[in-house]
Amino acid sequence: MSKALKLTLSGAVNRWFQGYAAAPGHVDELRELGPTMIRTAAILSILAFGGMATVDHLMVDGEALTLTRLTRVVSCALFLAFAGASYFGSWAKRFARPATVVLCLICGASVITLAHFTGNTASTYHDALLVVYFGFAVMPLAWGPFDALAQYLALIAAYDAVIILTEPAFHPGHFATHNAVLVAAFLVATVLQRILAHQRLIEYQSRSALAVANERLTALDQAKTRFFSNISHELRTPLTLIVAPLEALLESKREPLSMGQRERLELAQRNALRLLRLVDDILSLTRAEAASLKIHVTRLDLGELVAAFAADVNELAARKNITLTVKVPEPGLAMVDGDQTMIERVLLNVFGNAAKFVKIGGRIELVVREANVGQPGWGWEIAVIDNGIGISAGSLPHIFDRFYQADSSSTRSTGGTGIGLALVKEIVELHGGRVGAESVHGEGTTILARFPSTLPPECEANAIRQTAPKAEPQGLPEWHQAIRNARSYRLQGIDEATERRVAPRPRHRGDAPTILVVEDNPDMIRFLVALMAYDYNVLSAQNGRDGLKMALDRRPDLIISDVMMPEMDGFEMVRRIREDAEGAKIPLIFLTARGSHEDRIQGHAGGADTYLSKPFHSEELLAAVDALLARQQTLRAAATSQEEEAVVFMATGVVEQLSRSVSRLKDIQSEIGRVEADPMTLLGRFAEGLASLVDLVGALRELAEAGVKPLRAMGCIDDELRAVAVRATELSGHGRSMRIELGAVGQVAVEPDELRAILEPLVMRALEVTPPGRDASVQSQGASAGSGDGVASIVIVDQGPTLSHGQIERFFFPFQGGDGDARRALELARARRLVLARGGTVTVESGGVIGARVTVRLPTLASGAPALPPARSGSGIAGVAA
């Protein structure tokens, strides 16, 4: 037996036995269905047996007809007894399994009896056994794995026994045919019953798992609500003890504060109030979720409430040049049952959102009107209408969901927690009202809060009817309530939304380093500017796009940036800065609330030198700034030193060459007055000295212009190598040879004359330093198959003296390399500049005991490289000897 067949049979057996003992809860569920299944089977049996009685007279007559009808009556009486008894007591649940087994056997025995009275093998009543098989197979019964198998086999055996005992001369063909049909039906019905039982088990397990998951989610949700409620309570006291002393310091006339001290205390106060407001919102939201938030209901005029609110916020709206329009009905018309503090909170949250998303010079309209809900006189609605950026159709249905943000990207233009509108919805629904929103993306938004005129009865449980003003608690709660009633707390969200203050321009610090701060939070900008302004020149930008422009235009010495900013996040800003050659040198510090391990990796990978998480220590930030600026100064000093050294090298070489030429000319000048001097000889020497000067000037010009002109044609490495190697061996003298190994490289992104200027000095030097009788070698090789790097390499190896580390460093220095040959040194310097200008690289390595190895890598042409002559391609080696 194959392994696959064994696994198949094993799985079938396992599934056969699953269902009864595997899940006791499932068995209990099936037992609960026991009375229903007993009644269903009994009623269907009564209908079937009673209905078929109408055709008995067509099949039998006389005594057989009487016995047939008597059998039907007895059977129906038993079925009726089962059905009736199932309504009494719990026996039908406790004994659901045996009761349904007995019922199935009664049905089968009745069918066999009817078949006997109507002709045994000549009767067609045996077909009714098939109905019994399949009828009980499809019902959800609490049967074991072998119950159906045993019952169906017992019924077949009973049928055969009745025929054999009562009809000795039965027809064998009929008997065999009937048994074949019954056995086939028995097999199909038994398998069907087990398949359906297994399927019901799977469904039960899925429902059980879902129920357990729901219970866990409910428990987690309750735990979350308790946690938020508890933590909010615990946070309110210390926050109150932060805000209250700050306000006392700011309002005190006994302790005068300097301008800097006042600014920092106001900064701390604003952000403490912001945190206190957030804690209060979370607490209210969790209370509403737990149905423990109460509203103190009085009779209010919505029109007067909205008009007073508009007067409060009008000055703040004017800071952003927002036109505020108010439309309210006559006093005394828009009367509702409501909590004044809670409804004002609705206005604060909705208006704050509108002010946040309206551009400078925008428009907000506050309207109180009858609610259009299809019920005249139902109530009134507050509509806050703005012409801001609007809400997309996909986000509009979710704006009242808890913690939902229409823009959750790292470049969103405004902050927020997603609590404000969710709290609005909870408060309005506590009043029995409804919220709604209408918006056209890019044109504006309308938020609707509808309140019924009278509080619905279902809301009374969370309402406290109030006829007199609430008594204020004494002690710390009174202090807290006083802070919450203060204008600075109530209007804090709108104050932030209309914030237009920028960091004060610090005094210029002369030659001090310049630091660019890129941060979208105005308070954080002011703090960082104040922190840095004593020692540095500080610039600031409030989004990534402005920060990028300022970094590239002003070239600061260091950048401090947030990550999550509007228009362009910090990661993208840094990536673009690093694409600029000069911007890549600017050190950068990420100062952000995103402090996860993944964010740190992304920040450092993007080019940040230091990554600090908020909250941060000022001293740590200043230490990081000092360290990065010191490193930058060291790098600049080193670069300046290298540039000065290069200039000194160049000047020394030029002076040396000029001194030699001038010395020759002076020698000629001193010999002109002598009688024995030959004029033609002097003229020849003069021409020689002048030619050396011209040659020097030409070599310097070629060095300066190397790689400047645009690429107009492609060079072929193999062709140029052949020509250069032959010419070099001819010039180097007899006894030296060059081995050439060509790799069918084809064309490279270097012009032919430039390629010649690269290869010739390197090959000539290799031959010149190689002693007679030894071979230098040059090898070309294209990019390896499938590598996709698009780079060809040329390797030149000589057999001369090995190179020291200092000689390798000065190999391409003008007037310093070339093994003492100034002209060759200039040619080598020019070769290196050409390679780098065309996007290639060149390296020099010592050969160890003898010789040196120079490797040149040049970018190749991606496609269309011409084929090389067969004799020179591949890895063939050609020898060129002098």
Image (tube, helix red, strand yellow):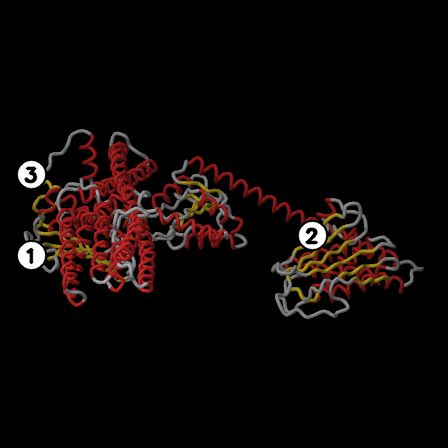
Q: Which residue is mark 2?
A: 843
Residue 377, numbered label: 1
Q: CA distance from mark 3 to mark 2?
A: 91 Å
- Tell me whether the residue at label 1 lies in contact with that at label 3, contact meaning CB atoms closer than 8 angstroms: no
**In the foreground, 660 or 203:** 203
- State the SS at label 3: loop
Residue 707 in percent (x, y) is at 65, 61
The first of marks 3 and 2 along the sequence is 3
Q: Nearer the viewer, mark 1 or mark 2?
A: 1
Image location of residue 742, percent across then percent down: 74, 62
Q: Horizontal and vertical percent for residue 522?
A: 34, 46
Per the rendering, the mark at residue 468 is 3
> Nearer the N terminus, badge 1 or badge 3?
1
Which of the pair 280/661 is nearer the observer? Answer: 280
Q: Earlier in the sequence, mark 1 or mark 2?
A: 1
Residue 348: x percent and y percent?
21, 48
Q: Secondary structure at mark 2?
A: strand
Residue 85 left/right relative to 576: left
Give the quarter of the image for residue 823: bottom right
Question: Residue 737's image quarter?
Answer: bottom right
- The amino acid sitting under disc 1 is Gly
Report the residue at 30% width, 34% height from top. 257
Q: Is residue 328 above or below residue 477?
A: below
Q: Amino acid at mark 2?
A: Thr
Along the line of sight, which residue is nearer the eye, 49 or 680?
49
